[in-house]
Image (cartoon, helix red, strand yellow):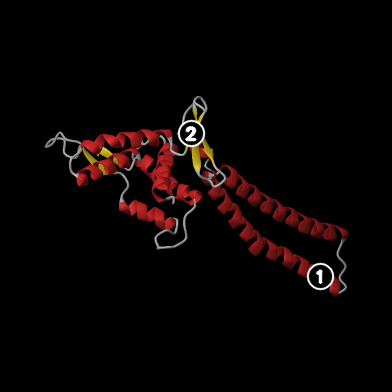
Amino acid sequence: MTFNDWMNFDKNYRQVLAARIRLRVDDVNDHSSRLLADNVCLSPSMIKTLENLNLKYKQLEAAVCHRVAMLQDALHDFGPSSQHFLESSVSLPWVRMVSPARVPYYVNNKAGTTQWNHPKMVEIINSLCDFNEVKFSAYRTAMKLRFLQKNLCLVAARRLTPRLCDTDFLVDLLSMSDAVFVFKQKKLQNVSDNPMDISDIIMTLLPIYELLQKQNSKLIRSVPLAIDLCLNWLLNVYDP
């Protein structure tokens, strides 16, 4: 189970605790109060049992609250939005760091340099220059976009009709229906003026690339790398 699964489980249990168990504990306390009001003496063992019941309930309630708080802290510190899992998107001598504004940057410990672009993104951007030899701007732009999509693991080369054609075609890996499904889950289907922060972007990209890897495990070997490259591209395009 993921952090979110455990949090939902504990929150649901907390609701059950408040709606059902607490109600029954209150019923027992009310019945005992009525008995005492009617001058019915409770035995010492019954009084002790009642005290233990209330004590156990308070301990259980405190334990559940504490567990939910611990899961929230763990999700914040180590969950997907923390960006810890994206550290594996680079290899030595590169190290992925995060600024106070949650923007990732990359440090080359060997060269002692720092840059905003992922090392792989630098290679991609440099390779885009190879398409400048294409004469017509529309074709040139289309080829650059397709090359970028391929490196972001959004398209792949496939042979559609091997018996009739020996040419590989680039096909979309992410269908519109899958994209819409993820956007609906993240409540992004409606137009909004509220900007997404980097954690929101990562949490949206994560299920997309997990789905793509599940469907194309041989093409997408590293989900963190794919997410980090797509995040890098989005920040370059949309970050003012």
Q: Position of residue 34 (x, y in %)?
A: 81, 73
Work out whether residue 221 can be spotted: no
Q: Residue flagged by tag 2: what amino acid is it? A: Ser
Which residue is labeled 1 in the image? 33
- 174 or 119: nearer the viewer: 119
Q: Is residue 193 left or right of residue 57?
A: left
Q: Position of residue 47 (x, y in %)?
A: 84, 60
Q: Residue at x 34, y 41 (%)?
A: 215
**Residue that lies at the very extreme toward the left in this rendered image:** 164
Q: Residue flagged by tag 1: what amino acid is it? A: Ser
Q: Is residue 69 above or below residue 26?
A: above
Q: Position of residue 97 (x, y in %)?
A: 53, 37
Q: Is residue 219 left or right of residue 81?
A: left
Q: Is residue 61 above or below residue 136?
A: below
Q: Is residue 201 left or right of residue 139?
A: right
> Could you say which disc has been placed on residue 88 in the image?
2
Task: Tell me the SS state at disc 2.
Answer: helix
Q: Residue at x 26, y 34 (%)?
A: 130
Q: Label 2 crowding class (10 Å Cα cut-off): few <14, some 14-19, many 20+?
A: some
- 83 or 158: nearer the viewer: 83
Task: Tell me the SS state at disc 1.
Answer: helix
Q: CA distance from mark 2 to mark 1?
A: 61 Å
Q: Residue at x 27, y 41 (%)?
A: 144
Q: Residue at x 52, y 42 (%)?
A: 83
Q: Earlier in the sequence, mark 2 or mark 1?
A: 1
